[in-house]
Amino acid sequence: MSKDRARSDLVAAYRRMTAAGLGTGSSGNLSLRTVEGMLITPTGVAPAILEAPQVVAMSLAGQAGEGQLLPSSEWHIHTAIYRARPDINAVVHCHSRHATILACAHRPIPAVHYMIAIAGVDEIPVAPYATFGTEALAGSVAGTLGRGRALLLANHGQIALGVSLDQALAVAVEVEELAAIYWGSLAIGGGKVLSKEAMMEVRTAFADYGQQHDKDTKDNG
Ligand SMILES: [Zn+2]
């Protein structure tokens, strides 16, 4: 992928995140892994007015070239995730409402709905609280992440990961939906959590579906 294409993909994903109702104001940030490190949304520029050249390029050691806008204040989280997870190429962070409600209550999301499989785990964990924008918060995220593709940040919001921006966004949308469903189920006495066996079957079905989808794509040229 060309650098220009990666920048415009990131801007488009930022706008899609907002259009999906996951962002409020200029809260939320996204990044995409590159050969040199990562591209990340700058701080304080609303998605509607962000332009591709304003996207910030950084190394995974946290160095940004001169003459750029300031990166998102949460850049520590993004670099920490790319260092810890070579399988991940895109990170979405937002304060979507229901995920944030559960994060404020320090409630992990259990497998009350089978779609939690999209997050690659049977329970979406909550990373312990630390002040926004700090290395301590990035450490909390890295320590909680495991092999999953989603987590809640205590008293703050959610993080979603993917092999691509499309996948990370899809995970973020699903986490918000799962959070809303779990939150609603708590209001009527609590949802019934699916068994490990039931979730194993879902993951197998998802894997088969993915292979089928790849095959179809190839078959269609
Ligand atoms: Zn945040």
Image (cartoon, grey):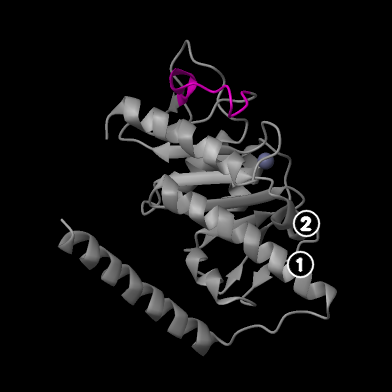
Q: Residue at x 42, y 39 (%)?
A: 32
Image height of 152 relative to 131, above or below: below
Residue 86 rendering spot, x and y as whole percentages: 36, 51
Instruction: Please give the range of residues in magenta.
Output: 45-56
Residue 59 visible, this orientation:
no
Above or below, comparing residue 168 to residue 48 in the picture: below
Secondary structure mostly seen in the magenta stretch: loop
Figure check: 152 above or below 95: below
Residue 34 x/y as whole percent: 34, 35
Q: Does the residue at mark 1 contact the one at mark 2 (Cβ under 8 Å)?
A: yes
Residue picked out by circle 1: 183
Q: CA distance from mark 1 to mark 2?
A: 8 Å
**Residue 25 at x, y percent in the picture:** 70, 32
**Is 7 placed above or below 194 here?**
above
Q: Is 153 left or right of 185, judged from the image as shown?
A: left
User: Disc 2 beta carbon < 8 A from ligand 1?
Assistant: no
Residue identified by numbered label 2? 101
